[in-house]
Amino acid sequence: MKIPYSNQKWTALALAALMLATTDSALAADNPPAGSGQQTPQAAQPAEQTAAKAQPLTIEAAIEQALKTNSDLQKLRIDANNADINARLVVASANDIPASAIESLSAAQNKYESEARAQVTKKLNALAVKAAENKTKLGAQSVFYDLLHAQAELELKKQSLKRAETQLKVAQAAFDVGTKAKTDILQAEMGVSGAQAALAVAQNNVAISRMKLNDFLGVDLQSEWILSDANRQVKAPEMTLEEAVSKALAQRTEMVQRNEELKLAELNRDLISKYSALSTYQGQMSRNNIEKAKLAIEDQKRAISMEVAQAYYNLNAAKLNVEFTQKAKEAAAESYRLTNLRFQNGLATTLEVIQAEEELSDRENQYQEAVHSYNLAVVNFETALGE
């Protein structure tokens, strides 16, 4: 018996609605909300194989691993140790010179200034190691968030592909009963092809980001991780700009170094005053060196203040960007939902649905990129503080 056209249309729309509902359920099952801890395995490997190989990794564990095995940091620690050994040799040689035997400026400088420089060098070496450790922490957080971002992008591309495949099924079902044209199928097929290409790029980015993380951590390049996303959007330190600048000036390594250089210049002036005369050429140059050291301190304060302010403003801008892109993503999701409903009722074309899906994908990507930029802005701000 031939089905009336009105019943054909009703059947096609019912089938379309059923497909959409089934796919939405599958999307919800395959893609849990952020923070649930469930991770989707890489498409290139069976789920069981990935789960067996992958190890959990938090941001704290990544930092700890990098501090232990990062190659550049290890080499710097060796160099600092050698410099400390040399400084101890200088101090030992200076101690061999009795104070009663010092009768000239050069002898005083050999004993007191050399010893002071050796002590300052030792102190600065320790600070240099600390600064390198802070830089390593920054690097570890950066590559960790890069991989986390790449994985989140991959999940978005998987969702986008599923939406495109669902649209193709709906268009095919409608075409089979004569309610849609062949062009609707062709447009849906183009949407699927585009989503597949984007998914391939995202999979490649995950593999590259994972290798960069492993290289920085100093572990096997093929190591696989299940990243903890509990801190997907990290919490920034709460303080005013004035508080941030004050904190940075108190603990940044560069300020310690400039202050120590001033102390050495003042020591040299005092030695010249005691064993020679400040009116000599050496005395005049020693006073000039003190003024130069003071200027260096002020320049360093200015540079640090500018760096902290820039990091502070970038952090605030990144925070606002997350809020704005989240609202845009939510609006795009609602627009896509309404366009789908219109399509099911014959009031929208396949092209309109594809365009709404592309807009949603773009907004999802922009939001994820904003979160990634915000996390890095937090890291850069903490680094500017000297932490």
Image (cartoon, grey):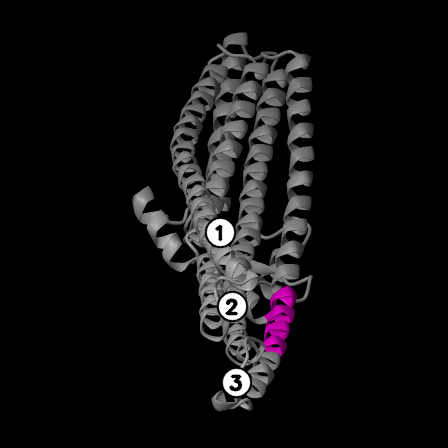
Up-down: is 345 above or below 34? Answer: above
Q: Quadrant location of residue 65?
A: bottom right
Residue for point 60% across, 63% down:
217
- N-terminal of the pair, mark 2 or mark 1, is 2
- The residue beneath circle 1 is 296
Asked if the residue under mark 1 is in contact with the one under mark 2, i.e. CB atoms within 8 Å, the reply is no
Q: Which element is circle 2 on?
A: helix
Q: Tell whether 313 sits left or right of 187.
A: left
**Disc 1: CA contacts within 10 A as few (<14), some (14-19) or many (>=20):** some
Element at label 3: loop
Q: Give 253 or 317, whichever is nearer the viewer.
A: 253
Can see residue 279? yes
What element does badge 1 sit on? helix
In the rendered structure, find residue 219 and report the number of the disc placed on it.
Answer: none
Q: Amino acid at mark 3?
A: Ile
Task: Tell me the distance, in whole angstroms, between the alpha carbons under discs 2 and 3.
Answer: 28 Å
The CA distance from mark 3 to mark 1 is: 32 Å
Q: Which residue is identified by label 3?
A: 102
**Main secondary structure type of the part rendered in magenta:** helix
Q: Amino acid at mark 1?
A: Ala
Image position, residue 27 (x, y; %): 50, 39
Between label 2 and label 3, give the one nearer the viewer. 3
**Dot 3 or dot 1, earlier in sequence:** 3
Residue 107 higher or lower than 180, as above or below: below
Q: Position of residue 302 (x, y in %)?
A: 44, 44
Mark 2 — residue?
A: 124
Which region shows up in magenta? 69-83
Q: Residue at x 47, y 34 (%)?
A: 367
Mark 2 and mark 3 lie on one chain; the one further toward the N terminus is 3
- Pinpoint residue 201: horizontal percent, then vertical percent: 68, 39
Labels 2 & 3 near each other (Cβ < 8 A) = no
